Image: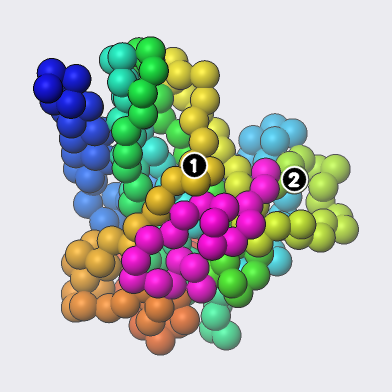
């Protein structure tokens, strides 16, 4: 009973911390993550990978542990449309882990969606399991990969961590569409499919984020 209560407490703490941000703060955070991934020395996401991407999922995950661990995170997913980038659709993840783990870690993830199937997986109103609905692989990095990059997986994964854990992966993790966050940000109920297809126009306050994404 005590063990279950500790797991619940840690998961609740991780999720509550991740959910404390407003939707605009999540969008601004996502813009910062993309900027950082573009400018990491020798480990940057190649410009060709970003320019040919059909979509991007960007999420920051907090992991905390004391014997058991919990993680929670929020972010956004966008897709290319006939008129440029779509508005952001909000996503989140959470869960528990076991084993002797003490510490805290923040990890930024960027998932490059290389084809329409990968975008479609994030367009559902339900959940996406990384590596299940679409194949996932670590993406190429650095200047040497700038030219001639041919996608070998539907999703390229990139991550950067800060903290005491050795590392964290979202392979097999469940990422859910946050319907309430979409409703609050757009001012009315809107589906992830409508947002990512471009049928819903991005709000003006998303303009800075979209400008960071570029063409």
**How many neighbours does mark 1 have within 10 angstroms: few (below 14), some (14-19), or many (20 or more)?**
some
Left or right of 153? Residue 123 is left
Report which residue position mark 2 lands on. Answer: 140
- Where the C terminus falls, by quadrant? bottom right
Which residue occupies 21% across, 71% down? 183
Q: Could you say where residue 38 lies in the image, as x and y percent from the top left?
A: 63, 45
| Viewer can see residue 157 | yes
In depth, the one of 128 and 161 nearer the eye is 128
Whether 121 is among the magenta residues is yes
Figure check: 210 above or below 116? above
Residue at the spot of label 1: 170
Q: Residue at x 31, y 20 (%)?
A: 68
In this view, the residue in front, 141 or 122, is: 122
Looking at this view, name the residue that lies furthest to the front.
1
Q: Secondary structure at mark 2?
A: loop
**Distance between mark 1 and mark 2 Cα atoms:** 18 Å
Which comes before the other along the chain, label 1 or label 2?
Answer: 2
Tell me the quarter of the image containing the N terminus. Answer: top left
Q: Quadrant of residue 13?
A: top left
Residue 18 against residue 181 in the figure, above or below: above
113 sits to left or right of 194: right
On screen, residue 164 above or below 167: above
Region in magenta: 120-138
Query: Is 175 located above or below residue 69 in the figure?
Result: below
Q: Residue at x 35, y 47 (%)?
A: 93
Residue 24: horizontal and vertical position, in percent? 28, 56
Indicate the position of residue 152 as horizontal and vertical percent values.
76, 57
């Amino acid at each position: 009973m005590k063990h279950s209560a500790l797991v619940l407490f840690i998961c609740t703490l991780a999720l509550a911390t991740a959910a404390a941000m407003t939707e605009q703060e999540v969008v601004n955070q996502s813009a910062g993550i993309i900027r950082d991934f573009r400018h990491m020395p020798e480990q940057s996401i190649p410009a060709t990978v970003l320019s040919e991407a059909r979509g991007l999922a960007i999420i920051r995950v907090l992991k905390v542990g004391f014997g058991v661990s919990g993680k929670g995170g929020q972010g956004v997913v966008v897709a290319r449309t006939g008129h440029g980038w779509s508005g952001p659709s909000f996503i989140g993840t959470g869960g528990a882990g076991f084993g002797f783990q003490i510490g805290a870690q923040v990890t930024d993830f960027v998932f490059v969606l290389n084809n329409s199937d990968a975008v479609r997986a994030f367009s559902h109103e339900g959940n996406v399991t990384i590596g299940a609905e679409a194949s996932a692989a670590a993406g190429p990095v650095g200047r040497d990969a700038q030219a001639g990059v041919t996608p070998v997986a539907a999703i390229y994964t990139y991550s950067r961590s800060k903290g005491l854990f050795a590392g964290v992966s979202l392979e097999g993790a469940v990422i859910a569409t946050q319907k309430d966050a979409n409703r609050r940000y757009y001012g009315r109920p809107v589906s992830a499919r409508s947002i990512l297809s471009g049928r819903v126009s991005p709000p003006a306050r998303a303009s800075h984020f979209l400008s960071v994404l570029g063409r």
